[in-house]
Image (cartoon, rainbow, N blue to C red):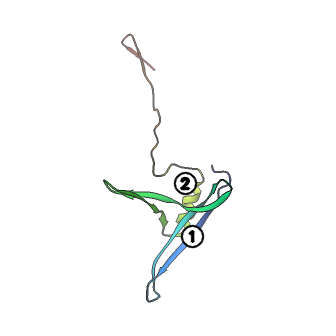
Amino acid sequence: MKAQTNFLIIHHEYFDEKGKLSTEYYYIQERKKFLWWSYWKDIEHEEGGWDSCYKTRTKFPTLEDAKTFVREVLCPEVPRDSFRKTIADEMVCKNGESEW
């Protein structure tokens, strides 16, 4: 669990040339530190195909979805855009016999 990490949930709205709401979503920013400076960084994920991948802002349709993501994924530091390998079991062979 992250000790004292701050997150912002930003509500993004785009209005077209006629003033009509065209796009609406929520995204999350995490407070980061570099030396003595603090800054806000977008939570991103990787998208792409066979030969090209790129980072893009992770978007959520509702505020509740964004809050749930912070609570259930970011705070407990669940791995994202990655994989995890663990040794499930180990066997040792001695004199042609296997031992557990």
Residue 93, x across and y down, in percent: 40, 16
Sequence-wise, the earlier of marks 2 and 1 is: 1
Label 2 CA crowd tier, 10 Å (few <14, some 14–19, many 20+): some
Q: Secondary structure at mark 2?
A: helix
As drawn, the residue found furthest toward the bottom would be 18
Q: Amino acid at mark 2?
A: Val
Q: Residue at x 53, y 49 (%)?
A: 78
Q: Secondary structure at mark 1?
A: strand
Question: To which quarter of the image does residue 40 belong?
Answer: bottom right
Is the Cβ of the residue at disc 2 closer than 8 Å to that at disc 1? no
Residue hosting label 2: 73
Q: Residue at x 49, y 66 (%)?
A: 60
Question: To which quarter of the image does residue 85 belong?
Answer: top left
Q: Residue at x 55, y 69 (%)?
A: 63
Residue 22, x across and y down, in percent: 44, 80
Between 61 and 15, the one lying in front of the other is 15
Q: Amino acid at mark 1?
A: Ile
Residue hosting label 1: 10
- Is 52 on the left or on the right of 77, as rendered? left
Task: Look at the picture and state if 12 lies above or below 70.
Answer: below
Q: Residue 1 bears which disc, if any?
A: none
Q: Nearer the viewer, mark 2 or mark 1?
A: 1
Task: Look at the picture and state if 84 lies above or below 71.
Answer: above
Label 1 CA crowd tier, 10 Å (few <14, some 14–19, many 20+): some
Q: Residue at x 41, y 58 (%)?
A: 54
CA gap, disc 2 to disc 1?
Answer: 17 Å
